Amino acid sequence: MTDLQTPLLDKINTVEDLRQLPESQLRQLANELRDETISAVSQTGGHLGAGLGVVELTVALHFVFNTPHDRLIWDVGHQAYPHKILTDRRSRITTLRQKDGLSGFTKRSESVFDPFGAGHSSTSISAGFGMAVARDLKKMRNHVISVIGDGAMSAGMAYEALNNAGASKSDMIVILNDNDMSISQPVGALSAYLSELITSRPYHSLRELVKEVANRFPTEIGQAAKKAKNLAREITGNQSLFSKLGFFHIGPIDGHDLTHLLPIFKNLRDRDITGPVLVHIITEKGKGHPFSDSSSEKYHAVPKFNIVTGEQKKPAGNLPSYSSVFADTLTNIALKDKKVIAITAAMTSGTGLTKMIDACPNQVFDVGIAEQHAVTFAAGMATEGMRPFCALYSTFLQRGYDQVIHDVCLQNLPVRFAIDRAGLVGADGATHAGIYDLAFLSCLPNMIIMCPSDEAELAHMTYTAASFDKGPIAVRYPRGSGIGATITEKATPLSIGKSRIVNEGKNLAILSIGTMLETCKEVVSLLAKKRGVNATLVDARFAKPIDKKMLDKLCNTHSSLLIVEEGAPGGFSAQVMQYLVNSGHLDSHFKMRAATLPDKIIEHADHNVQLESAGLDVFGLLKQSENLISNQLEMGKIAQT
């Protein structure tokens, strides 16, 4: 850590220590906690803005409620770093997102203070309601608090949960953390006062509450009293969506003012509440950030940075990212073809589509955190002759899987899927790993799947998708920078299902899919240098349909085949193996192996470390190649041509 002065935080070894502090010291503690969070993220990188916005809320919740007996669920988990510091993990906070270190999200196996793991958004209300009902069935007594951001409220799952929970009598508290609106100081103060008032005692009617409010304000403050009456009506949620769903709705409240938060939370803790409550708080994302408001790192995820200057420690090199290559290519296509539409789910920046918004804003749609809707929205456009590209991270496409099957594939609609962050994603870990899409898409009828080996191939495949109108087609590409391949000004569509030979040899053939090709090239080079083996290397290009003619050729001219993919079992390799088995190619003279990711959860670490642990690095694949041809090597039967 840096030389921070954190005298109060230094006394907090457990949440019980926090609860022993006088309330007058909690403001100082929050300031120290904010500084500690900034210092930690400057060393590890990670999600900074969200955590800075909930520092006071984190302190207040742990101070008032009896966590972990009272369940505290953070939606997504981006904002949980201050929570981790206060809950017995401060000594490990600089291991965030590092191999064998703390997760960047909440994680049940990491701490009893994380009752529910997260990474994807909008799950907290459903999980909290499940815990509340389970508590009631077991006749236990504890509070359940779900904290969800306004962004996560754009997902349908949140409203499904609100609808279900609101119709029940189970007690739970939902805190809506709204960091996308402002609240004036007078209104905020009145709102907090009234929220405290209505949570401190039961009111049998709105009229009774309004009368109480009017009596407490002198008549000479006419406008303030009128505003108070209006707020009283608003705070009781008489007309709010949440109230109509069955929640007792209070707020909005200044989420950075502990004098507002503490009394309201105490009242909610101590009073006999029947049914669910929603507390609406207003916060500032990135509050207390030490650098300029225009700094992009204030708002979401950041690499390591200099805590004094704010300079980010970005990787060396000027190679374009796969996301930017996709976005640049699609933008060029869209400028010429007004039928080309881009759709994303709250990921315009991550998918690179901000460029397309600048160039042709009417052809880009951000539907919010609503992947299911995004897919069917694209399907609807496709029925009307448009050419929609649904650009989603691989890990988030999982949330729209039913729609991919039912609304796209079964109707054979020409929806284009741009699947970003395919493969392992390093420090973001298991919740964001894009390693399942090859398996869950390959089994779908009508689906075509392309996997570029470099950024130039991605440009060609984006053009291929744009010009393909016969059914659904996907192109999946990894996170990070390309390899420096030359991108031609005019990309051309590829022949569907056709692979390409990169290196011709004998005996051993290596079939690579996607960006594993560069690693496979090194393996081929080492085989030649170390063993005198000239192996054939094929870039599959298409995970579906597979190139059956190429597979037939490889089996007829080689004795061994190694299939390499950065994906879970059941994907491309499974398709190839099934074909070879069914076509009768496998016999005692032909060996085949699949080098895939293991059938287990792969935790956060550097991407190269993840590949090494899975045996998908150069030396791991070299070993598997040598094992395949070990008999021939021993007998000296390997052709060195």
Image (cartoon, grey):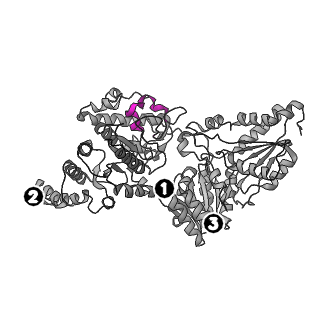
**Other residues around mark 3 within 10 Å, as few (<14) / some (14–19) / many (≥20):** many
Mark pair 3, 2: CA separation: 67 Å
Whole-percent x, y for residue 212 in the image? 13, 55
* Residue bearing mark 3: 414
**Other residues around mark 2 within 10 Å, as few (<14) / some (14–19) / many (≥20):** few
Whole-percent x, y for residue 197 in the image? 19, 50
* Residue bearing mark 1: 346
* Placement of the C terminus among the 4 image quadrants: top right
Q: Label 1, secondary structure: give it.
A: loop
- Residue 444 visible in the current orientation: yes
Residue 336, compared with residue 597, is above or below; it is below
Which span is picked out in magenta?
A: 81-106
Mark pair 3, 1: CA separation: 23 Å
Say what amino acid the circle numbered 2 marks: Glu
Residue 64, compared with residue 460, is above or below; it is above
Mark toward the viewer: 1 or 2: 1
* Residue bearing mark 2: 220
Q: Label 3, secondary structure: give it.
A: loop
In the image: residue 153, left or right of residue 559: left
Mark toward the viewer: 3 or 2: 3
